[in-house]
Amino acid sequence: MLSERRLQVLRAIVQDYVGTEEPVGSKALTERHNLGVSPATVRNDMAALEDEGYIAQPHTSAGRIPTDKGYRLFVDKLAGVKPMTAPERRAIQNFLDGAVDLDDVVARTVRLLAQLTRQVAVVQYPSLTRSTVRHVELLSLAPARLMLVLITDTGRVEQRMVDCPAPFGETSLADLRARLNSRVAGRRFTDVPRLVEDLPDAFEAEDRGTVSTVLSTLLETLVEENEERLMIGGTANLTRFGHDFPLTIRPVLEALEEQVVLLKLLGEAGDSGMTVRIGHENAYEGLNSTSVVSVGYGSGGEAVAKLGVVGPTRMDYPGTMGAVRAVARYVGQILAES
Amino acid sequence: MLSERRLQVLRAIVQDYVGTEEPVGSKALTERHNLGVSPATVRNDMAALEDEGYIAQPHTSAGRIPTDKGYRLFVDKLAGVKPMTAPERRAIQNFLDGAVDLDDVVARTVRLLAQLTRQVAVVQYPSLTRSTVRHVELLSLAPARLMLVLITDTGRVEQRMVDCPAPFGETSLADLRARLNSRVAGRRFTDVPRLVEDLPDAFEAEDRGTVSTVLSTLLETLVEENEERLMIGGTANLTRFGHDFPLTIRPVLEALEEQVVLLKLLGEAGDSGMTVRIGHENAYEGLNSTSVVSVGYGSGGEAVAKLGVVGPTRMDYPGTMGAVRAVARYVGQILAES
DNA sequence: CGCTGGCACTCGGAAGTGAAGAGTGCCAGG
DNA sequence: CCTGGCACTCTTCACTTCCGAGTGCCAGCG
């Protein structure tokens, strides 16, 4: 177990390194933080911290920089979450309040997060899995062609074309529309398959084919849309990454373009509370020198999606976590209102 | 006027520089292209080209690199558009054919363009301005709350909430829905305002407020959505930009995040045919060292939106133009089918 | 036993040097 | 008008040197 002072030294190293981006030496440490001991003592502590794997030196005769393990300890034990100031909170709320629709909410959230944290922001669209159906609409576009529109409680709208095996009359259409809505409106997406199972039985033989087609399209939509969408922003912040650009930045940009990777990344994060994945804790190799701070957000008590930021492992964790948490909270409120 | 050979020299310089990314000297030129003259002669030609502003040298005793003006001449006079090979065309078609909805079409197009050109791809969603209305749907969510859904011929769907000033009965709703559709279905968005102008007159006094509200929401949607959306991809290709990263890449990433900038960029490009904007020809300062190749695409003969790529001025223009043109063509086809 | 000051040592980075090589401009001759 | 030759310019790279930050260790002190 590390002594209290050694933890303080580690904290100081992380803070200084995050601030200066340069390896920090024993002398500088004692000057900038009043630890009450001499550089020599700090050196001993540093040696111990290095033995334990919390810090490392890039080369002999350079200062120390925190390792992933060091950041982990810092995040878990040494640092809290820095709350947003009142003006900041007001600004967040104002900014988000102006949103006109779901796309806009997400877009604004991304911008906001990127600006607040000065890092890359990732916001997942509210998932359909945990959403409920607000309304299903069927429109007749041509005698044997329908459009299926699905509206969720989070304001998301999905549409699909349906080619019917046989012409489908307006009466049947109205009937189907009514029955469908009475069964699924207000229900969770996951319950829908069960709820519509026997629906074709209520129709005349000639219409059953079409009804089945419509239903299977509906179910497909649910499944497909579980491959959820997300929006990213603030990539320009990557340029502040480090000095050794091309090599670091490239895999990150590639990862950000692979929605699958990002979704997996967010998916792996814990369902409740904030998750911080540091460096090699990220499964995806390209993100081995980045940290991901993510948290679920939702309209009610329950999280419907996640958002977060991706930045260098050398990031201001307390500040970033504070911003992420605050934004998630306000987005949740906005969604609840709309 | 430049002699035929000098033009050839310019062409050779552009080609070599694009290939090697290094200033090209007189000797290398004569070796790699059989110009039939000696290096000394080429040097004279180069001096002339430099006087005219088509090429420049980074420092004395370095080779020459094309200037924006040089690229312009190259694009206008010296290079054609390199057509895609048959296998490439098949690949494009196959890739796009798998798309399930409009979002998917756009997403695939972006990926494809980025991959083909190895540059940053930008694809604008089909604009509402030139589209026609396929259907307008009204759903009653609560006694005094409606949802307005607008479906375009390009498959795009927009929805808006409408808070009614007074409760609105199902009969009136059906009436409004029918009247609205009979007037605007199949019509261009720009014609809609005129077509619905006198619609409230057809309703009872008590419903007129609601009808007006619905109509103004509809018109708002048309206007708002003219601030069109777009999707970008292939930003990882920016890392191949040059050696002097941070400074070059940063403003580009920033520009790409500013949809307004991009839309303006695409908007300024000519309406028909392919447009190439080279370096400083781009109004936006951050893109002064990039070229933008863009072209309109559309389901019919008419362009409904644009797509293109953003890359370093030192790009393979014939190849890029070929890819952009081919992709635009096939996307148009896909849209026409759906 | 832990802290401290001192000291020798290491090593990376900056600065300076010199040689090599690419490329140029110009000129005289074909 | 083209060509070969030549002197000149500058960048690049490898090499060396030097400086200083930072370390580890040790002996002494409270």
Image (cartoon, coloured by chain):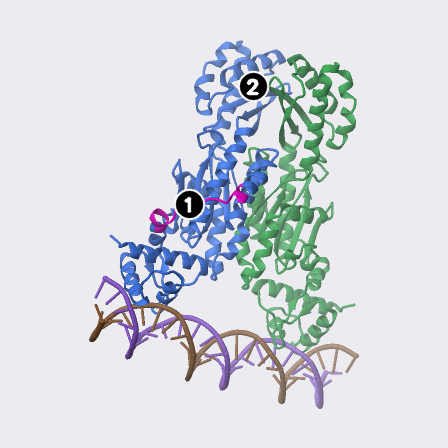
Chain colours: A green, B blue, C brown, D purple
Position in image of residue B176 (x %, y %): 55, 14
Can you tell which quarter of the image residue A31 is in?
Answer: bottom right
Q: Secondary structure at mark 2?
A: loop
Earlier residue among tags 2 and 1: 1
Q: Quick one: quadrant of the C terminus of chain A?
A: top right
Position in image of residue A199 (x %, y %): 76, 21
Q: What residue is shown with label 1?
A: B81
Q: Is residue A124 visible?
A: yes
Q: Quick one: quadrant of the N terminus of chain A?
A: bottom right
Q: Which mark is residue B165?
A: 2
Q: Nearer the viewer, residue A25 or B118?
A: B118
Closest to the camera, between mark 2 and mark 1, is 1
Q: Secondary structure at mark 1?
A: loop
Q: Residue at x 39, y 51 (%)?
A: B279
Q: Residue at x 67, y 36 (%)?
A: A225
Q: Residue at x 79, y 22 (%)?
A: A198
- Determine the CA span between mark 2 and mark 1: 58 Å
Q: Specify whether disc 2 shares its chain with disc 1.
A: yes
